[in-house]
């Protein structure tokens, strides 16, 4: 007689998993709702359901705040760092839905599919933020990447969008392969895929200088650097940012960087913290190169999206400073800066979306000329965003840079703090050029807005006679809200400091 053996799978903490389930469940609901043919359902209900899903992730994150637990056999960590990054991703997702509401991409890609892809890539970012296992890291990385490749190419009648998706696919595949190879070498050197097991292997032997381990660290860093737009692995960024639909670019610029920095903090400050003396100087040099390359590359740009792409490269260099020091203060500074970066970037991209719709000039700087007098509700959020990204006092960008420099000085990387100051000085050359265009130049007459005409034409037909149109209240509201947040958090940073402090303590480092 064969005895029956009870089989038990790993315990699943559904409460801890709830923010991720909200995103994935929302993706399924949105996809199904998009199958209805009624225009009201597709163009109003589907985006509303996507906003509800993102909002549910935020609310469930509030429920799980201060929980600090491992779930799914230790594959994921639910702590304040993971929840804070999930909030960043969800807020960026809500803003992206609002910016996409009247845009071309959801109509050409089908509304259900577009918003389902957005929720799915956000779920990948949430997985990456909480990953504490090498296998989970790769799963989150791919779940993040594949929907983004498609989203970049959702304006299927525009060559630039298709080119953007193809370039991101090719370069992203190289980054994925490099990351996978690096993770495999880390496993080969330590004999464990769990971050705790890797840290234990490093603390109990002489692996910190082992060539196999160092090669794995280098390749893992390169894979993350591709996703975070860290030089010299940033070459895809300007072309992809410029070609992708602007709402998708806004989401990529903020949420992807948050997820990449979160997983970098977990890998390097948890699994590899005992090898910091080996990888720390190399990452610091990489951060310095990224700051200089990004700021210098942005100076000559006339496309606002390309300029913000090069700016994103420089900002990635700033944030790497928080990873280098391997301290709670470094994690705190990185999270603080990521939230500030969310507010500043979304304010800027909201203005770009508005001017693309109101003029026929696309994302050229000329589209911003004179809006200080004609469109002040767009001019002042862009002004605050540019000043914040440059690190001018009374903005959240200034406080964020102070936090990063403080962490670097405390971690004996003062020279990198000096590089951040120099990079901020260089950045004034292009940030102030945007401000001057808005407030010191006369407004231009709007040209035929082909994008607006294409939006109103059914698929498979030629667009109607082109003409300019208003941006939409939701876009102006996004610009104003995030512009105000950039200013408010620069004047009263205490709430954000408290959130960042909780996140900084999540990894258990000093």
Image (cartoon, helix red, strand yellow):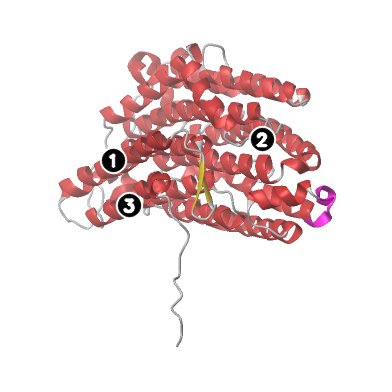
C-alpha separation, residue under disc 1 versus residue under disc 2: 33 Å
Q: Which residue has dot 3 on it?
A: 25
> Residue 2's x, y, as percent?
46, 85
Of residues 398 and 64, the one nearer the viewer is: 64
- Reply above or below: 61 against 111: above
For disc 1, the neighbor class at 10 Å (few under 14, some 14 to 19, many from 20) is some
Secondary-structure class at tag 1: helix
Q: Residue at x 78, y 51 (%)?
A: 214
Asked if residue 457 can be seen in this view, the reply is: yes
Direction bottom: furthest residue: 1
What's the magenta region? Answer: 205-212
Which quarter of the picture shows residue 411?
top right
Of residues 247 and 404, the one nearer the viewer is: 404
C-alpha separation, residue under disc 3 versus residue under disc 2: 33 Å
What predominant SS class does the magenta segment belong to?
helix
- Reply above or below: 74 against 408: below
Please give the label number shown on residue 457.
none
For disc 2, the neighbor class at 10 Å (few under 14, some 14 to 19, many from 20) is many
Secondary-structure class at tag 3: helix
- The answer to the question of whether label 3 and label 2 lie on touching residues, with beta carbons closer than 8 A, is no
- Direction from residue 133 to residue 245 in the image, left or right: left
Of residues 47 and 362, the one nearer the viewer is: 47
* Residue 210 part of the magenta-drawn span: yes
- Direction from residue 460 to residue 65 in the image, left or right: right
Please give the label number shown on residue 52.
1
Q: Which residue has dot 2 on it?
A: 323
Upstream in the sequence, badge 3 or badge 1?
Answer: 3
- Reply above or below: 354 against 203: above
Q: Residue at x 38, y 33 (%)?
A: 353
Q: Residue at x 58, y 24 (%)?
A: 430
């Amino acid at each position: 007689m064969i005895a029956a053996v009870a089989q038990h799978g790993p315990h699943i903490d559904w409460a801890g998993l709830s923010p991720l389930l909200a995103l994935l469940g929302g993706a399924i609901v949105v996809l199904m709702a998009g199958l209805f043919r009624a225009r009201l359902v597709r163009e109003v209900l589907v985006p509303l359901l996507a906003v509800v899903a993102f909002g549910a992730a935020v609310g469930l994150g509030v429920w799980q705040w201060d929980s600090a637990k491992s779930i799914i056999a230790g594959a994921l960590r639910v702590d304040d760092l993971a929840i804070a990054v999930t909030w960043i991703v969800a807020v960026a997702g809500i803003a992206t839905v609002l910016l996409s509401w009247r845009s071309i991409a959801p109509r050409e890609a089908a509304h259900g599919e577009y918003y389902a892809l957005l929720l799915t890539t956000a779920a990948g970012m949430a997985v990456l933020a909480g990953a504490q296992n090498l296998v989970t890291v790769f799963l989150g990385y791919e779940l993040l990447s594949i929907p983004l490749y498609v989203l970049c190419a959702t304006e299927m009648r525009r060559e630039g969008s298709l080119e953007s998706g193809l370039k991101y696919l090719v370069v992203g595949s190289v980054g994925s392969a490099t990351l996978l190879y690096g993770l495999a070498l880390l496993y080969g050197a330590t004999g464990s895929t769990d971050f705790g097991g890797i840290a234990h292997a490093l603390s109990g032997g002489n692996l910190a200088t082992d060539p196999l381990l160092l090669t794995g660290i280098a390749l893992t860093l390169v894979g993350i650097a591709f996703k975070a737009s860290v030089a010299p692995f940033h070459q895809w960024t300007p072309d992809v940012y410029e070609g992708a639909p602007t709402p998708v670019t806004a989401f990529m610029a903020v949420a992807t960087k948050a997820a990449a920095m979160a997983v970098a903090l977990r890998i390097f400050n948890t699994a590899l913290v005992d090898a910091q003396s080996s990888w720390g100087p190399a990452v610091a040099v990489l951060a310095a190169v990224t700051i200089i390359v990004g700021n210098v590359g942005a100076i000559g740009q006339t496309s606002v999206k390309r300029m913000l792409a090069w700016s994103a490269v420089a900002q990635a260099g700033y944030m790497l400073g928080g990873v280098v020091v391997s301290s709670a203060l470094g994690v705190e500074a990185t999270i603080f800066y990521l939230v500030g970066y969310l507010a500043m970037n979304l304010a800027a991209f909201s203005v770009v979306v508005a001017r693309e719709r109101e003029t026929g000039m696309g994302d050229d700087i000329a589209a911003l000329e004179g809006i200080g007098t004609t469109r002040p509700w767009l001019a002042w959020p862009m002004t605050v965003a540019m000043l914040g990204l440059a690190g001018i006092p009374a903005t959240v960008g200034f406080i964020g840079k102070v936090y990063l420099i403080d962490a670097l000085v405390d971690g004996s990387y003062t020279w990198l703090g000096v590089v951040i100051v120099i990079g901020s000085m260089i950045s004034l050359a292009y940030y102030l050029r945007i401000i001057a265009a808005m407030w010191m130049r006369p407004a231009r007459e709007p040209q035929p807005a082909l994008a607006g005409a294409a939006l109103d034409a059914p698929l498979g037909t030629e667009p109607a006679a082109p003409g300019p149109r208003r941006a939409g209240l939701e876009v102006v509201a996004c610009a104003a809200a995030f512009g105000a947040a950039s200013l408010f958090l620069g004047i009263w940073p205490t709430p954000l400091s408290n959130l960042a402090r909780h996140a900084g303590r999540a990894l258990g480092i000093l």
